[in-house]
Amino acid sequence: MKNLGIGLFFFFFTVAAVANDVDKRQIVPLSEHQRDHILSEMRALLAGTRNILDALSRDEMATVAREARALGLGMAGKGENHLRSVLPEAFMRLGMSVHKDFDNISLDAQSIKDPRHTLRQLSEAMKKCDSCHASYQIRINEDAAAAETPPLQQRHHHSH
Ligand code: HEC
C-alpha cells in the first residue's frame, strides 16, 4: 500500500515534469531552406561574437571594429531581409536591433577604443540573443516554402 503511494507519487511527478518540459516558445514556421538560412546566420553571430572577445582580450580594437561591422545591418541586408514576409514583426525588429548594436559597437571601437566600453555594449546586445531565444523556436513547415513565391503576399493582403 505504502509502495503504491510512492509509485503513484513518482508517476505523477514524472508526468508533471514532462508536461513542463514542452517547448512553449512561439513557433516560427519556416521551410527547410529558410531555417538553414537563419541558423547559418545565428552561427555567424556566435562565431563573430567570439572573434570580438578574442580581439578584445588582446586590445586589438581595429579587429574588434572589423568583426563587429561584419555582424551589422549589412549582414541583415544579405541575410534575413528577404525573409521579412515570413518572420514575425517583433522577431524582425529584435533581429535588426541586434545588427544595429553591432554597428554601434564597431563605430565606438574605432572612435572610443575602450575595451571595457565595448564589453558593456556587447553584454547589453547579448541580452537580445537571450530574449529572442527565450521567446521563439523554429519549426519546419513546408507550407512556409510557399512564402518564397508571391502567392503568400496575396494571402497576407487578404488577411489584413
Ligand atoms: C530575433 C531573434 C533572435 C536573435 C536576436 C538571436 N537569435 Fe539566435 N536563434 C534564434 C532562433 C529562433 C533560433 C532557433 C531556436 C530553435 O528553433 O530552437 C536561434 C538559434 C541560434 C543558434 C543555434 C544555431 C544552430 O545551428 O542550431 C545560435 C548559435 C544562435 N542562435 C546564436 C545567437 C547569438 C550569438 C545571438 C546574438 C548575438 C542571437 N543568436 C540572436 C533567434 C534569434
Image: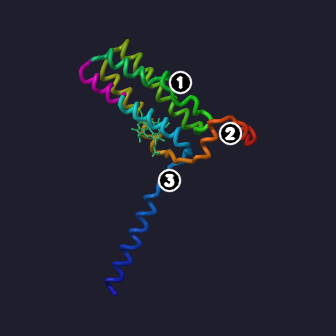
* Mark 3 CB within 8 Å of ligand 1: no
- Which residue occupies 49% across, 45% down? 135
Q: Residue 104 sits in which quadrant?
A: top left
Q: Is residue 15 above or below residue 80?
A: below
Tally of numbered tags = 3
The Cα atoms of the two marked residues, 3 and 2, are separated by 26 Å
Label 2 Cα neighbours within 10 Å, binned few <14 / some 14-19 / many ≥20: some
User: Where ligand 1 lies, by quadrant?
Assistant: top left
Residue 141: % across, % down: 57, 48
Q: Which residue is mark 3?
A: 24
In the picture, which quadrant includes the C terminus? top right
Residue 143: % across, % down: 62, 46
Q: Amino acid at mark 2?
A: Leu
Q: Does residue 50 show up magenta in the picture?
A: yes
Q: Is residue 8 above or below residue 84?
A: below
Q: Nearer the viewer, mark 1 or mark 3?
A: 1
- Which residue occupies 38% across, 78% down? 8
Q: Which residues are magenta?
A: 48-59
Q: Earlier in the sequence, mark 2 or mark 1?
A: 1
The Cα atoms of the two marked residues, 1 and 3, are separated by 30 Å
Per the image, label 2 sits on a secondary structure element best described as helix
Q: Nearer the viewer, mark 2 or mark 1?
A: 2
Residue 134: % across, % down: 45, 45
Question: Do tag 2 and tag 1 residues touch (Cβ < 8 Å)?
Answer: no
Q: Which residue is mark 2?
A: 152
Q: Which residue is mark 1?
A: 77
